[in-house]
Image (tube, rainbow, N blue to C red):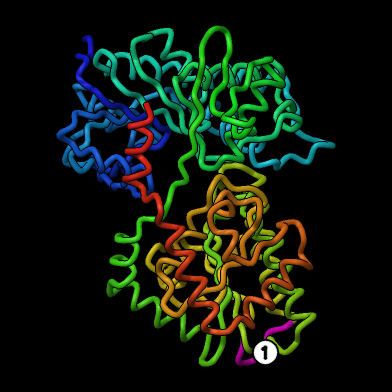
């Protein structure tokens, strides 16, 4: 049965705003998600007629998608939003999501490969790439079916890099934008990809009217790749400034920058609830009276650089023994992508180094590292409130919202130690203690400086950091993209 064209605004992303658990009795339990995209879409409201197209991620999702007779999920599960969840074959989804998106494109843009031994693009990768093409085509088909004439479509992230061009072929009347939530690799590194794949990803995004990024740096890197790989023309602003568009094969794709900010109202309200107060008391008891805290909140994602953060903390204790028994590193390292061996190994290495630090420096009344591996948002917010120092040292990050959230929630002011390779550096760098994420010695020195910072300076910096961090909250971020299209 043909799907009626009803949607004037569409969003496409791998993960949707709701997920489902399938019970043994066949019942489905819905759980609504959070994050910037969910908050952003709420800016247009259900009455707009917008449709969110996403993929079924697990068996519960697939069953929900199968039961949705009109192709849309029950609005009672989605907060009133119209959501179309695609039941893509599990083997196709796994090859596209794990084989290409998370194991190749993510690694390319975050510069994660050990190039003497990886990547290896062989026959298995060719099969995975074919699955990635099929996965993107499924999204393009669904969007083409749902969109009214001249609708606006916002395609999200590296999972769906081919969709804009595919959708352009199906529906040339649409206004199509693509937003990259990751960094973008510089040309020399990007060209690790097979030549045809490197070109296909760029051509895919250039099928849109607009390609947007979190920072000017990532937008420029994308344009540079288009020039190096495709021979495309880069259009620059007055005086040869920032790249403003890419011209290729008779089309012009405009470039934009939208630095996603923290949702201050939500964070401040949520961080003062009873469950957060309860966890705050527990954390304070774990740290101990009179001690300072260095807090990090991350998934055990390779790019987050947790291992070097721990090594820097160990170096701090070694070179500045005055901090022993006076500081605790509260490290939240929530397991991520544990279906990939390299991530399981990394998670285990984080745990092992934390144990080594505690064995080497711990005393009867002091545990130097408090490592938490169970995901708990309320506990994360409690840590934001009490942190004296926040450590955010990614190897490379599209933005890093933790760096923006901590100053918003902090009670007494928090010194931010921030990697210059995080997208957030562009907005927060002036009031952070900036580090090279590979430099353990330099990071240890920055931690020492942060711990010594006086209360007045810390409070002043935090105030300025919070203002910069909330300049473009999720709803404004989403609407800015809509207006630009």
In which quadrant of the rendered image does the N terminus lie? top left
Q: Quadrant of residue 117?
A: top right
The answer to whether any part of residue 335 appears in the image is no
Residue 338 in the image: above or below residue 457: above
> At 26% from the left edge and 28% from the top edge, which residue is drawn?
51
> At 35% from the left edge and 24% from the top edge, which residue is drawn?
153
Q: Position of residue 484 (x, y in %)?
A: 38, 30
Secondary structure character of the magenta stretch overall: loop
Question: Which residue is the extreme one toward the right?
Answer: 116
The answer to whether any part of residue 405 appears in the image is yes
Q: Position of residue 77 (x, y in %)?
A: 21, 42
Question: What's drawn in magenta, residue-wise?
Answer: 361-366
Q: Nearer the viewer, residue 145 or 121?
A: 145
Q: Position of residue 70 (x, y in %)?
A: 19, 22
Q: Quadrant of residue 101?
A: top right
Q: Helix, strand, or loop for circle 1?
A: loop
Q: Nearer the viewer, residue 245 or 98?
A: 245
Residue picked out by circle 1: 363
142 relative position to 247: left or right: left
27 relative position to 447: left or right: left
């Amino acid at each position: 049965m043909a799907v009626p064209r009803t949607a004037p605004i569409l969003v496409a992303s791998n993960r949707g705003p709701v997920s489902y658990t399938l019970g043994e009795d066949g019942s489905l339990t819905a759980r609504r998600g959070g994050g910037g995209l969910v908050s952003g879409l709420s800016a247009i409201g259900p009455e707009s007629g917008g449709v969110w197209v996403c993929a079924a991620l697990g068996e519960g999702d697939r069953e929900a998608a199968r039961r949705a007779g009109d192709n849309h999920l029950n609005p009672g599960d989605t907060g009133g939003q119209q959501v179309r969840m695609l039941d893509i074959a599990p083997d196709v989804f796994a090859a596209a999501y794990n084989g290409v998106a998370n194991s190749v494109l993510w690694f390319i843009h975050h510069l994660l490969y050990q190039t003497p031994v990886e990547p290896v693009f062989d026959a298995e990768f060719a099969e995975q790439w074919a699955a990635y093409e099929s996965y993107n085509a499924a999204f393009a088909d669904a969007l083409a079916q749902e969109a009214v004439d001249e609708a606006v479509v916002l395609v999200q992230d590296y999972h769906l890099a081919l969709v804009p061009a595919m959708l352009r072929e199906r529906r040339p009347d649409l206004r199509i934008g693509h937003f990259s939530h990751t960094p973008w690799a510089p040309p020399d590194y990007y060209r690790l990809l097979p030549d045809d794949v490197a070109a296909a990803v760029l051509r895919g995004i250039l099928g849109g009217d607009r390609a947007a990024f979190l920072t000017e740096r990532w937008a420029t890197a994308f344009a540079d790749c288009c020039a190096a790989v495709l021979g495309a023309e880069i259009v620059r602003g007055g005086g040869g400034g920032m790249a403003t568009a890419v011209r290729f094969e008779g089309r012009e794709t405009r470039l934009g920058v939208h630095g996603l900010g923290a949702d201050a109202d939500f964070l401040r309200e949520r961080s003062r609830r009873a469950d957060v107060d309860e966890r705050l008391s527990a954390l304070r008891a774990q740290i101990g009276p009179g001690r300072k805290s260095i807090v990090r909140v991350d998934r055990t994602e390779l790019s987050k650089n947790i291992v070097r953060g721990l090594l820097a903390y160990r170096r701090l204790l070694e070179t500045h023994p005055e901090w022993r028994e006076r500081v605790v590193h509260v490290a939240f390292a929530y397991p991520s992508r544990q279906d990939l061996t390299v991530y399981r190994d990394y998670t285990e290495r984080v745990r092992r180094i934390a144990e080594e630090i505690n064995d080497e420096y711990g005393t009867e009344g002091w545990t130097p590292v408090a490592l938490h591996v169970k995901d708990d948002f309320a506990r994360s917010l409690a840590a934001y409130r009490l942190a004296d120092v926040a450590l955010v040292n990614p190897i490379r990050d599209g933005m890093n919202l933790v760096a923006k959230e901590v100053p918003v929630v902090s009670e007494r002011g928090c010194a931010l130690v921030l990697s210059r390779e995080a997208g957030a550096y562009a907005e927060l760098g002036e009031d952070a203690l900036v580090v090279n994420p590979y430099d353990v010695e330099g990071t240890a020195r920055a931690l020492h400086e942060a711990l010594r910072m006086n209360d007045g300076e810390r409070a002043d910096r935090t105030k300025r950091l919070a203002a910069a961090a909330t300049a473009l909250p999720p709803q404004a971020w989403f609407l800015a993209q809509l207006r630009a299209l």
